Amino acid sequence: MSSDPAVTSADNGSDIIISIPLDYYTDNDEDSYGAGPLIISSCVVQGGLAANADDCNDNDNSIYPGVTEICNAIDDDCDGVTDDGLTFVTYYEDLDTDGFGNPLVSQNTCDGPPAGFILDNTDCNDTQLLYLDADSDTYGTGAPIACGVSNNTDCDDNNGAINPAATEVCNNLDDNCNLVTDDGLSFDTYYQDMDGDGFGNPAVSQSTCNGAPLGYVLDNNTDCNDTQLLYLDVDVDNYGVTYSWLAELTIAKTVMTTIIRLILLQRKSVMVLMITVIVFQMMD
């Protein structure tokens, strides 16, 4: 005896086939799933028609019940849900293309990031590039970061006193980041005074903007020998005396006294001239 519902048994035990008509619907995309109003009920298979009305899009043969859902914002398997069973990821807009996304503008998709969107969402300002300001002087440096200042013009981001707005000071550093050290400052030349006599060595000097270095004197480069003290030798006998302004004034006083005496004695004017020349040479 048959188990087919379309087959029944006669009293004599033989099978009698009973045909049950099926409802057929339009199957425009020929995917075996129909749609729309009933076309015909028939016990005979109808070509070009489908014995069901389960198709949710009868114009696309890739859409029908049981098909694998893909990421396309379409209900591919006709279960009433779009893109169900797929993995969705949230992406964030990166308007300034710095690699950091705007947490306030996002899209959730199952097929990768949309153009201009990334996974990161840490950008503090997505309308401009931001840079690290390690010394908190409002001037940054290096490559763009998520949160920072809007410029990267600092030439030393570890020193808050050095930045493009700083005033240059005498320290052998480029304080204002213009690639020039100690520019705009006044420099003086100092000469080494090794023997400490107040007279500098013209062959050894330093130009500085912050005063005399240790062991140097200002604008006095007249020392003939800076390795030892030298003394005045008026009588050219290779033996000198301690020379100072007091000694010089004493000598000048003595010479002038002699001049006066010569004048009083009405000596020759040539002698007076010679002594006068000597005095001025000593005082030069």
Image (cartoon, helix red, strand yellow):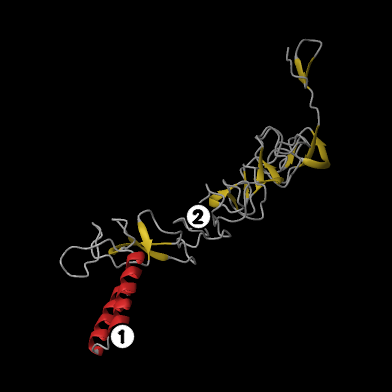
What kind of residue is marked 2? Cys
Image coordinates for residue 143, horizontal then vertical, percent: 53, 50
* Disc 2, SS: loop
Q: Residues within 10 Å of mark 2 (few under 14, many from 20)?
A: many
For marks 1 and 2, give the CA distance: 78 Å
**Which residue is nearer to you in this view: 61 or 3?**
61
- Dividing the picture into quadrants, the one containing residue 35 is top right
At 74% across and 44% down in the image, what residue appears?
A: 58
At 76% across and 36% down in the image, what residue appears?
A: 81
Image coordinates for residue 42, horizontal then vertical, percent: 80, 35
Residue pushed farthest top?
12
| Mark earlier in primary sequence (1, 2) | 2
Image coordinates for residue 86, horizontal then vertical, percent: 66, 34
| Residue at image mark 2 | 155
Q: Is residue 210 above or below residue 51?
A: below
Quadrant containing the C terminus is bottom left
**Which residue is nearer to you in this view: 238 or 104?**
238
Residue 262 visible here: yes
* Disc 1, SS: helix
Q: Is residue 161 above or below residue 200?
A: above
Numbered badge on residue 88: none
**Which residue is nearer to you in this view: 167 or 115?**
167
| Residue at image mark 1 | 264
Residue 29 visible here: no
